[in-house]
Amino acid sequence: MSTTPKTTTGTTVIKTTVLLIGALLLFAPFLFQDVRALEVAARICVFIVLVASYDLLIGYTGIVSFAHTMFFGFGAYGAAIALKQMGPGWDAVAVGALAGVGMSLVVAVAIGLLSLRVKAIFFAMITLAAASVALVLASQLSTITGGEDGITYRAPTIFKTATKLMLDEDGKVMRIMGVKLNGKLAAYYFVFTTSLVLFYVMVRLVGSPLGTVLKAIRENEARAEAIGYRVVSYRTFVFCIAALVASLAGTIYAIWLKYTGPDTVLSFNIMIDILLMVVIGGMGTMWGAVIGAVLMVIAQYYLRDLMGVAAEATANLPVLPELLDPDRWLLWLGIIFILLVYFFPKGIAGTIMAKGDNT
Amino acid sequence: MENITKIVERLGGVSLLPVAVALIAFVLIGAPSSWVTLTIAGLAMGMMIFLMASGLSLVFGLMDVMNFGHSAFVSFGAFIAASVLAGLSGWLGSDLIILNVAALFLAFAAAILFGMAAGWFFEAVIIKPVYKDHLRQILITMGALIVAEQMILAIWGGTPMTVPRPHFLEGSFLIGDVTIEVYRSFAFLLGLAVYVVLYLTLNRTRIGLLIRAGVENREMVEALGFRIDRLFVGVFMLGSALAAMGGAMWAGYETLITPALGGEMMIVVFIVVIIGGLGSIEGTLLGAIMVGLMANYVGYLAPKLALTSNMILMMVILLWRPNGLKPAVK
């Protein structure tokens, strides 16, 4: 027995994969030169942060919260409302991000202190209720939030597609490897860099002594309390951290999309996506968040196309086309999800990391 | 001050809460006739929610199992009952009351039978492997909920469905200057009947004794040689059947149902169970009536607050009693 974490060949495989994904994301605009691929890459970046922050709760501390999209939504709506009211500019982004973070922290502290003392199940139910209230409020207070239609606004000037970052001799947008150096590229790298920073902060956080305490609470709450750690304070703290990161991820996503509505940031479907990503990737490993987010987002964008083809191919058979309809893809994901929780509760990353000899 | 506390305790303690709410609402509303209408609507709504929530509460109390997929039974019950009623629309339209009742009975029976079968399946396939593991329970039942909702979308489609009501439950009657909808009083009476049956079963029969003993101390009951797990399957099936029945009644009450119904009701059911205290039928009834009354009074007095009234109610009650109003002894 050693006190240092075990290094298995599996761990090396996972870390290499994550590095590879990072490299692919870094060069995404140059490797995949179409609009949709860039959308996918940006969404992956934002969701890696969101899923990793959720993993802080569910994987590292053992708290099941269904209010994570609520905090994501606070950040997104904060930025959206500020950009709409104050016009495009960095001051609006700052105000929006701060407002979102502030709101998230207040709500997180309130929920945390009120309900983290009780059993995990109570907490899950209360967060679910809170999230549904937030969703209803967002779609009802249409004067502020734009209701069901959401808000469309303009991002800071540097992120406009028409903005030219560098000019060549002819006064046109400079190209590197055929990629225009325009605002879209700047926006992508803004998303990538901020996501990377947030993810790195979280990786450091779980590696710190704090992360160890959190794992201790997950494994044996009574014992952690007996050793002298205030379990409620730690749980509330990590809930606030997760809320803060989710809120910032929301702000980033709002700046990228230039649109914020209940469906893109608040709906329960996003909560389900996050849950699926965490479980598929592997709870309790930051690397799992990366793998889960990548797989799910790619599945979201491309699996539906595949299912459409399958539905057409089976059009003459009974029932099957109904079940293979692209709109039914959640059905299959749900089944995969249940099977994963049964047979691979550690997810992809956790299962692979446990394999192989110690090196 | 102490005397007042004692008197309140003797009269029923927290059970008086709905009465207090009703009295405050009476003062605020002012008009007696609308107060009566609202109160009856609230009671009817409360009774239907009680049906949906009671199973969840019992299952948790007995086996420490929280089923996040419970609302799937509610929506399946609603859609199955609606389909049966739509199929028998000829009977519903007829003037013969016996055909009306038969159609209604068949619709409820279909919903309840489905609830029992689905409950058995759910217990055996989904929940049995993850006893005593709350985290995986929450995840797995959530996954099952996703699958169930998608199946409803696949079978009935995403468009709203109109639910025909039996002829004799249509319309309303007048007492003085108070209009009372027939369906509401029907829902209230049926809910009350179910509560009485449940209460008597739990408190006057041998099975009920075992269930209550199991809620209080499961290991001890098992040590005495009773098969709690078999009992649990029964309770789970009963709970799912009640949820399906509640869904069927709710379909008739709303007359227009969408696949989103399950998700909406799930939040309300959770709030009721948390307010009432997990594991007790009395607590669930109390919570359901409180939520029903509050929803109707607040909807009348301050429509803008209506959306958040349940949430505020839950917060206040949790601050006052962190384990709910009437938790089972644990």
Image: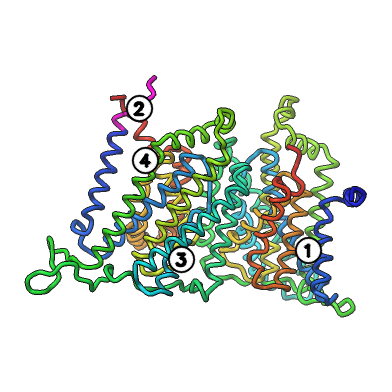
| Residue type indicated by callout 1 | Leu
Circle 1 SS class: helix
The residue that mark 4 highlights is A204
**Whole-number angstrom distance, CA of label 2 to CA of label 1:** 60 Å
x 87%, y 51%: residue: B12
Q: Does residue B136 appear in this view?
A: no
The residue that mark 3 highlights is A77
- Same-chain status of marks 4 and 3: yes
x 40%, y 36%: residue: A208
**Whole-number angstrom distance, CA of label 4 to CA of label 2:** 18 Å
Using the image as rendered, state which of residue B12 and residue A319 is in the foreground. Answer: B12
Residue A126 image point, x, y percent: 61, 52
| Residue type indicated by callout 3 | Tyr
The residue that mark 1 highlights is B43
Residue A110 image point, x, y percent: 59, 53
Residue B232 has which mark? none
The chain letter under disc 3 is A
The residue that mark 2 highlights is A6
The chain letter under disc 1 is B
Q: Which residues are magenta?
A: A1-10
Between label 3 and label 1, give the one nearer the viewer: 3
| Residue type indicated by callout 4 | Arg
**Whole-number angstrom distance, CA of label 1 to CA of label 4:** 54 Å
The chain letter under disc 4 is A
x 70%, y 39%: residue: B62
Circle 3 SS class: helix
Question: Mark 4 touching mark 2, by CB under 8 A?
Answer: no
Circle 4 SS class: helix
Residue B189 image point, x, y percent: 82, 62
